[in-house]
Image: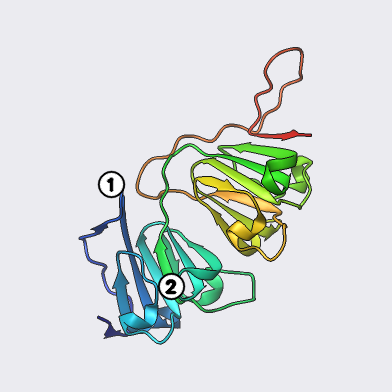
Amino acid sequence: MSEQQSAPEQLAVGKSQGGAGATYKVVLFEFENFQGCKAEISAECKDVTEKGLEKVGSLIVESGPWVGYDRHGFTGEQFVLEKGEYPRWDTWTNSQSSYSLLSLRPLKVDSAEHKLHLFENPKFTGRKMEIVDDDVPSLWGHGFQDRVASVKALNGTWVGYMYPGYRGRQFIFERGDFKHWNDWEAPAPQIQSVRRVRDMQCPLLPAVPALCLPDHGKRCLCSVTIAM
């Protein structure tokens, strides 16, 4: 049930379990800057209007991470919501194509290690890019194109962006296989930057340095590698 709230109050100490020992809690406010009615969420919510809110103008993630959607029923454009304060809609998205947030769910982070394979063509064919424990602000900067038509998320949870520098529409990759860009609800096979989604409630392993040694018959220690 929602209640009238003029400013963010001290959030409750208790948290709800979110699976695999994780805890999740987010506070939604109807207006910007944490004004108006509020609703506290600790589990998936298919429709925020069922919590007494006409819309979401700001929010505070006490524990997460979460993924929000601009439509009911976990559909439409996706927004990663990590621990922190979001005083207005453009703090959780910069795609400029949607300012609605109508459903959200906890985002499971199954591992502190991260490994992702990007493929040029559907069904895991064509050129391949492997990313291990690293964030990549530009695929072009590592010798890969912006066409990504299939993805394998082998470890961890990732978010891809349509444009370099973690800008534009977001696409969530939880552990699993994505044979076609329709599987992550993309309008086209375009991804230009990717980063890891961090579990803010447990320590993370240090990232692997983006270092490539000369190949003299030895293993190349890289966080990002390209295969033809």
Question: Could you tell me residue 135's position as x and y percent?
Answer: 60, 45
Residue at the location (43% across, 80% down)? Answer: 56
Rendered residue at 60%/63% (across/down): 185
Secondary structure of residue under mark 1: loop
Residue 62 relative to residue 128: left or right: left
Q: As shown in the figure, which amino acid type bears the numbered disc 2?
A: Ser
Q: Which mark is residue 133?
A: none
Asked if one can make out residue 18 in the rendered structure from this viewpoint, the answer is yes
Quadrant including the N terminus:
bottom left
Q: Does residue 99 appear left or right of residue 161 in this picture?
A: left
Can you tell which quarter of the image residue 66 is in? bottom left
113 relative position to 8: left or right: right
Q: Percent from the top left, x then y, of residue 129?
A: 70, 39
The residue at which mark 2 appears reads as: 103
In the image, is residue 114 above or below residue 164? above
- Say what secondary structure mark 2 lies in: strand
Is residue 166 in view? Answer: no
The residue under label 1 is 21
Give the percent coordinates (x, y) of residue 203.
38, 40
Amino acid type, label 1 = Gly
Q: CA distance from mark 1 to mark 2?
A: 23 Å
The local crowd at label 1, few if under 14, some if 14 to 19, many if 20 or more residues have their Cα within 10 Å, is: few
- 97 or 47: which is nearer to us? 47
Rendered-image quadrant of the C terminus: top right
